[in-house]
Image (cartoon, rainbow, N blue to C red):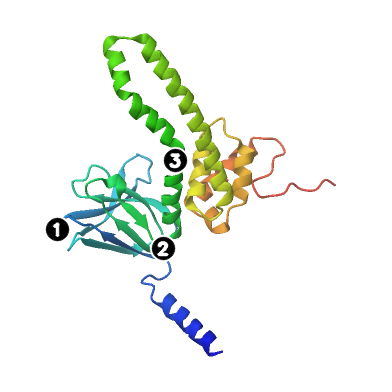
Amino acid sequence: MKKLFLLLSASAVLFSCSKVGKDEYIITGTAAGIENGKTIILQTQDPNGMGGLINIDTVKVENGKFEIKGKVTEPSIHFVQLEAANQPILFILESGEINIEVNKDSIQKSKISGTYNNDEYVKFNDEMKVIQKKLIDFQSANMLKMNQAQQAKDTAVINGLMKQYQTIQEEVGANSKTKFLSYAETHPKSFISALIIQSMLQDPSADIKQAEKIYNGFDEELKNTKPGKEIKQRFAAVNSSVPGAAAPGVAPAAAN
């Protein structure tokens, strides 16, 4: 009994140490090698769909660290831009303690962790890199050969390389699609799953029924995110154009 009490007490201390409350976030950044005073900008996508980024917060690097606090009601794609860096760091802003380790020499190698969706995002990206490696390796191995063939106007070599590239591209594309669907089917809580289905519905050749089945398996919290609601609207629009079709998640009325 005493051991149980001690265990429960330790658990209470653990949970009470959280720095964030409901709908709050803290981004704790490590910026090794970056001088004091450099600007870090928190950015979001333009809600008007113009394709740009909007600045929503700005902090300064101090002793190789920075911190950004705020409130958020649901997960969404955001970016951290380091002053003078050639590209921002993409991450998922959500409630919790988010850690960003900035790699000033290679922004693409910056590390993100700390919350469920960001950990999933990193893991998913790593798995996709494995799938796409064959295509990247082919490009690297044949770049010089292609350049030389183009300079020499050797169409036989150019066409041969293009044919090989297309074959690998189709293979990687098919494997990527399989991975997307498999992930969305097995991760009903992940924000990435909603983004996958949202992207899938932009493809005219997409299997709507398959996408709808996956969506119906999502947790309610994920369905209530902005992309979740947009997916539902898309299904409703598609089903309303089909005579006798029911809206997603709604069973058709029984015949009299």
Corner quadrant of residue 148: top left
Which of the labelled discs sits on residue 95, or is there none? 2
Whether residues under marks 2 and 3 lie with C-beta atoms below 8 angstroms apart, the answer is: no
Callout 3, which amino acid? Val
Which of the labelled discs sits on residue 127, or is there none? none
As drawn, 163 above or below 101: above
As drawn, 140 above or below 56: above
Location of residue 29 in the rendering, given as x and y in whole percent from the top left corner: 28, 60
Which residue is painted at 55% across and 38% down in the image? 178
Corner quadrant of residue 73: bottom left
Callout 1, which amino acid? Gly
User: How many residues crowd around disc 1 within 10 Å: few (fewer than 14), some, or many (20 or more)?
Assistant: few
**Which residue does the numbered mark 3 point to in the structure image?**
130
Q: Secondary structure at mark 2?
A: loop
Q: In 3D space, how far apart are the residues under numbered discs 2 and 3 (Cα atoms)?
A: 30 Å
Whether residues under marks 3 and 1 lie with C-beta atoms below 8 angstroms apart, the answer is: no
Which residue is painted at 41% across and 51% down in the image? 122
Which residue is painted at 44% across and 75% down in the image? 15
Between discs 1 and 2, the one toward the N terminus: 1
Location of residue 192 in the rendering, given as x and y in whole percent from the top left corner: 48, 49
Comparing 129 with 13, the one in front is 129
Q: Is residue 90 left or right of residue 190?
A: left
Q: Secondary structure at mark 3?
A: helix
Callout 2, which amino acid? Ser
Location of residue 169 in the rendering, given as x and y in whole percent from the top left corner: 46, 28
Between discs 2 and 3, the one toward the N terminus: 2
Between discs 3 and 1, the one toward the N terminus: 1
Q: Is residue 169 left or right of residue 107?
A: right
Which of the labelled discs sits on residue 37, or is there none? 1
* Residue found farthest to the bottom: 2
Q: In 3D space, how far apart are the residues under numbered discs 1 and 2 (Cα atoms)?
A: 27 Å
How many numbered dots are placed on residues in this image?
3
